[in-house]
Image (cartoon, helix red, strand yellow):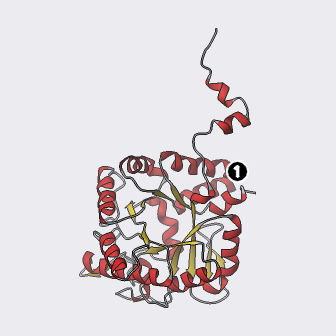
Amino acid sequence: MKLIHRGRRLRVNNGVRELAKETIISIKNLIYPLFIVEGENVKSEIPSLQGQYHLSVDMLKDEIEEIKDLGIPAVILYGLPEYNDQLATSAYDENGIVQKAIRKIKEINESLVVITDVCLCQYTEHGHCGIIEDGQILNDLSVKLISKTALSHAKAGADIVAPSDMMDGRVKAIREILDEEDFEYTSIMPFSVKYASGFSGQFRIVEDYSPSSGDRKSYQMDPANSNEAIKEAELDYQEGADILLVSPALSYLDIIYKLKQKFNCPIAAYNVSGEYMMIKAAAEKGLIDEQTAAMEMLLSMKRAGADLIVTYFAKDMARGFN
C-alpha cells in the first residue's frame, strides 16, 4: 500500500512533534492566585487546596520573589478580612487586607501585574456576593459597593480589577468610577461567565465564605446554559471589560471557544480549585501522572481559546513539575 499522506510523519520523534505542535502554553500567560490573611508570620497550608497557602502581608516578600524568579507575570489576590458586617465595609477600607497586600507587593516588585478579586462575599456576615435585605440581594446597592471596592484597589496600585460577583451592571459602574477618579488605564477583567459550579467547592472552604443561607444560583449561571453565557459576556464587553473570564474552565471549554470566536479581546479561563484538586488527589493515589494530566488540562483550555489562565499549577508549570 502506497500512501501519499502519513499523519505519523509529524509524530515520528520528539523533535518533529515539537516543530509541529499547534498549541503552546507559556508561563507568560499564567496567573497565580494568592490568599492573604490578617495577622503576622502566617504561612499555613490550606488543607482543602494542597500546595497553596494562607499568607499574612509580612510574609509576602519571599513569595513574591519566588514568583518573580519563576517568571510568573501576574497574581490575583483574594483577601480574608479581620471582620465582616452587613455592608462589607472591610472590602473598600483603604487599610483592608487586599489593599495592604497590593501596596506591599508593589513595594517588593513594581513590575509584577497585580489583579484583585472584587467581590463582597468574604466581607459580609452572610457570605453572599451582594447586600441582602428581606432575603433578597439588592443588585444596585451591591454594584455601588463593588465599584467602590474596585476603586480602593486601583488607588492601592492594582493593575487589573476582577469583579467576580455576577451582579448586573457592575462593569459599567466600575469603569465609570475608575475613569472619574483618573484610573482610566486600570483594566477590568470581570468573571463574565461564572457558573454555580460544584467544581468551586474547595474555594469556598479556602475563603470561608459559603453563604450562611441559600445559594448563589440567583446570580451565578446555570451550568445548563450556553446562549446566556454569550449574552452575559456581551454585556460586559459593551460596558467596558478589557478581558472576559470564564469560570470554571474544564467543563466549559465550549464557552471559552464561543467567546474567543465572537469577541476581539483576550479571553481568560479560571482553572478552579476543584479541577486542580481532582488531579492532585488522583495523583496521590497513583491513579494518574500529575504532570501529564495537568499539562493536558491546561492545554485543553488554551486550545479552546483561552489567552490567559488563572491556575494553581502556575508554579509547577514554571518549575517543569520538578
Say which residue appears at 54% left-offset and 86% top-offset. 100
Which residue is at 51% across, 68% downward? 203
Crowding at mark 1 (Cα within 10 Å: few <14, some 14-19, many 20+) = few
Q: Which residue is mark 1?
A: 286
Taking depth in this image into account, of 113 and 12 the one nearest to the observer is: 113
Q: Residue furthest right?
A: 322
Instruction: Name the residue: 46% across, 90% down.
Output: 94
- Which of the 4 image quarters holds residue 16? top right
Q: Is residue 313 above or below residue 214?
A: above
In which quadrant will I find the N terminus?
Answer: top right
Q: Which x, y percent locates residue 268?
A: 47, 58
Instruction: Please tell me whether residue 203 is drawn above or below residue 18 in the rendered image.
Output: below
Q: Is residue 89 above or below residue 274?
A: below
Q: Quadrant of residue 311?
A: bottom right
Q: How many marks?
A: 1
Which residue lies most toward the left here?
A: 134
Image quarter in which the C terminus is found = bottom right
Query: Which residue lies at the image location 41% right of the left edge and 56% below the top edge?
Result: 265
Q: Three-letter amino acid code at disc 1?
A: Gly
Q: Position of residue 121 (x, y in %)?
A: 41, 77
Can residue 287 be seen by looking at this rendering? no
- Is residue 59 at all visible to an observer of this figure? yes
- The image shows residue 65 at horizontal and vertical percentages of 69, 74
Q: Is residue 114 above or below residue 268?
A: below
Q: Which residue is the extreme one toward the top?
A: 1
At numbered mark 1, what does the secondary structure look like: helix, strand or loop? Answer: loop
